[in-house]
């Protein structure tokens, strides 16, 4: 693919994954339009992107169909990252989660169809596996959703499949497994685990862990998620469309292991921490163990993780120190 001929819309582009993706697409030579309503995204995430003359910023909301239509002018492909994340937040605010993640998604998908944009890549989530207990997680072996957030992501996948079948759209869904890395917000009640752990370790503050700390996750460095999006936007494999894919490393680690890995990484930079680990009650909507099979995405999209978990930890800490 000649990226210089591509004009990619990244929704939620001022967010954590979105801003990293925008930067990579610009580096490849693509034109990029970033649309974000700044509900959870931040303009400072786009500082490097603004250095490229091929970057466009648009403040807009996927819940507003007119904004969706306006954002698609001239666009050749969409990477839809906009969403209201967090399982706990979805339990507390199910209506707002549905409005953004389900209705907003459909607004963007339908606007792309009406604008004649065929390639539509979107962020799904490992949460769609719900109460399925088998490991690793294979696409097509999902359980029942156990949070409103999971329901919205499953609905995204169903809508995308319908639009692929009805309208010939080249949809690709990416089920992210616990992505971490630069620009991830460590603050707030809904902050992700690794940036929150790092902030506590650097400040020698107590680390609160939900449950016994032995729950496992397939932690995935953000550049792996970016790579999956780039491969999805550029794929010429007709068998790849209309499907969903796990985006992960294919390795699982407990939260206690992660904390120790972060301690060692910080120590290598001369930052030593004696933060206490405080175990608490399990969190509603959480799964105990998560591990992805990355066979399908490897076969159909030629994806292989560019960073292992430990390499991702090292790169993340390097970016902070």
Image (tube, helix red, strand yellow):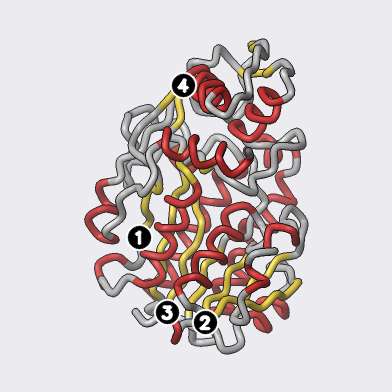
- Residue 216 vs 179, above or below: the answer is above
Which of the two discs, 3 and 4, sits closer to the camera? 3
**In the rendering, at what x and y percent does residue 304 appear?**
30, 50
Question: For this view, does 94 lie left or right of residue 304?
Answer: right
Q: Residue furthest front?
A: 270
Question: For this view, does 261 lie left or right of residue 161?
Answer: right
Q: Earlier in the sequence, mark 1 or mark 3?
A: 3
Q: Residue furthest left?
A: 299
Marks 4 and 1, how far apart at CA:
29 Å
- Residue 122 vs 28, above or below: the answer is above
Q: Earlier in the sequence, mark 4 or mark 1?
A: 1
> How packed is label 2: few (under 14 Cα within 10 Å), some, or many (20 or more)?
many
**In the rendering, at what x and y percent does residue 53 appear?**
62, 81
- Quadrant of the rendered image containing residue 164: bottom left
**In the rendering, at what x and y percent does residue 98 appear?**
67, 53
Residue in view at x 41 percent, y 70 percent: 233
Residue behind mark 2: 7
Q: Nearer the viewer, residue 302 or 119?
A: 302
Residue behind mark 4: 254
Q: Earlier in the sequence, mark 1 or mark 2?
A: 2
Which image quarter holds the C terminus?
top right
Which of the two discs, 1 and 2, sits closer to the camera? 2
Residue in view at x 50 percent, y 41 percent: 315
Helix, strand or loop under label 2? strand
Which of the two discs, 4 and 1, sits closer to the camera? 4
């Amino acid at each position: 693919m000649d990226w210089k001929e591509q004009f990619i819309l990244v929704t939620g582009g001022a967010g954590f994954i979105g801003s990293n993706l925008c930067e990579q697409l610009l580096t490849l030579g693509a034109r990029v339009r970033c649309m974000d309503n700044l509900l959870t995204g931040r303009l400072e995430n786009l500082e490097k992107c603004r250095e490229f003359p091929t970057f466009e910023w648009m403040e807009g909301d996927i819940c507003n169909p007119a904004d969706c239509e306006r954002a698609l002018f001239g666009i050749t492909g969409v990477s839809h990252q906009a969403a209201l994340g967090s399982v706990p937040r979805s339990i507390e605010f199910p209506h707002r989660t549905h409005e953004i993640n389900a209705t907003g998604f459909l607004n963007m998908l339908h606007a792309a169809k009406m604008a004649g944009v065929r390639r539509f890549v979107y962020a799904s989530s490992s949460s769609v596996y719900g109460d399925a207990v088998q490991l690793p997680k294979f696409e097509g072996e999902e359980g029942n959703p156990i949070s409103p957030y999971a329901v919205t992501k499953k609905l995204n996948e169903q809508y995308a499949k319908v639009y692929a079948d009805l309208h010939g759209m080249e949809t690709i869904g990416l089920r992210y497994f616990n992505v971490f890395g630069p620009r991830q917000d460590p603050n707030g009640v809904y902050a992700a685990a690794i940036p929150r752990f790092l902030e506590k370790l650097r400040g020698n503050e107590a680390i609160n862990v939900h449950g016994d700390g032995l729950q496992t996750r397939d932690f995935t460095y953000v550049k792996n998620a970016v790579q999956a999006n780039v491969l999805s936007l550029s794929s010429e494999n007709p068998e790849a469309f209309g499907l969903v894919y796990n985006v992960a490393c294919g390795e699982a680690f407990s939260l206690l292991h992660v904390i120790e890995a972060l301690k060692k990484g910080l120590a290598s930079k001369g930052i030593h921490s004696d933060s206490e680990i405080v175990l608490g009650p399990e969190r509603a909507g959480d799964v105990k163990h998560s591990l992805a099979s990355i066979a399908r995405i490897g076969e159909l999209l030629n994806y292989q993780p560019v960073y292992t978990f430990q390499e991702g930890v090292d790169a993340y800490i390097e970016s902070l120190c």
